[in-house]
Amino acid sequence: MTTPLTLTPDRGPDGTTTLTVVGEIDMSNAPALTAALDDLPGRILVDLTGVEYLDSAGLSVLFAHADRIELVATPLLAPVMTFSGLNTVTTIHGLADSTESDGRP
């Protein structure tokens, strides 16, 4: 059975390619995330604030695209991304706070 996942590509007001991800990312739907990222050109801002669960299959997909993605994650998910070496922008109460890949704010 596939875990519910919604992937919505868009463009931000400044023209940035975005992918909004909502639901759970696991081995049952990680290929859909891969396909969505592969279909989008250039740099991508991936909004993970609607992700409720992320397993190692999802992390593997994000890591494989690390050279061209920037992540928006909840404060709970951001440390996992940072620990994995992924560039993350954490949304805290509506404010963006950049986090370096070495874990320093």
Image (cartoon, grey):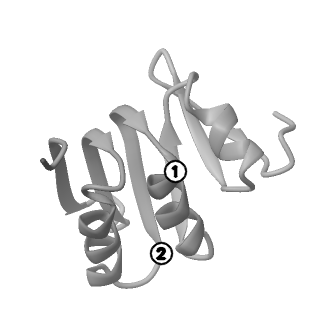
Q: Residue beneath label 2, please?
A: 43
Q: Nearer the viewer, residue 48 or 3?
A: 3
Q: Residue furthest front?
A: 1
What's the residue at 54%, 63% (across, down)? 60
The relative height of residue 79 versus residue 39 in the rendered view (above or below) is: above
Q: Which mark is residue 6?
A: none
What's the residue at 21%, 62% (across, down)? 9
What's the residue at 67%, 56% (across, down)? 86
The type of residue carrying mark 2 is Arg
CA neighbours of label 2 inside 10 A, class few (<14), some (14 to 19), many (20+) = some
Q: Position of residue 8 (x, y in %)?
A: 17, 56
Please count the marks in the image. Answer: 2
What's the residue at 35%, 48% (across, down)? 26
User: Could you tell me if residue 12 is visible in this image?
Assistant: no
The type of residue carrying mark 1 is Leu
Q: Residue 10 vs residue 104: left or right?
A: left
Q: Position of residue 38 (x, y in %)?
A: 34, 82
Q: Nearer the viewer, residue 65 or 54?
A: 54
Q: Position of residue 85 (x, y in %)?
A: 75, 55
Name the secondary structure under disc 2: loop
User: Could you tell me if residue 102 is visible in this image?
Assistant: yes
Quadrant of the snapshot with the C terminus: top right
Q: Residue 24 vs residue 5: left or right?
A: right
Query: Counting residues from the N terminus, which is met first, the one under dot 2 or under dot 1?
Result: 2
Q: Residue furthest top?
A: 93
Q: Position of residue 69 (x, y in %)?
A: 52, 66
The relative height of residue 31 versus residue 8 in the rendered view (above or below) is: below
Q: Residue 57 vs residue 96: left or right?
A: left
Name the secondary structure under disc 1: strand
Q: Residue beneath label 1, please?
A: 71
Whole-angstrom CA distance, mark 2 to mark 1, is 11 Å
CA neighbours of label 1 inside 10 A, class few (<14), some (14 to 19), many (20+) = many
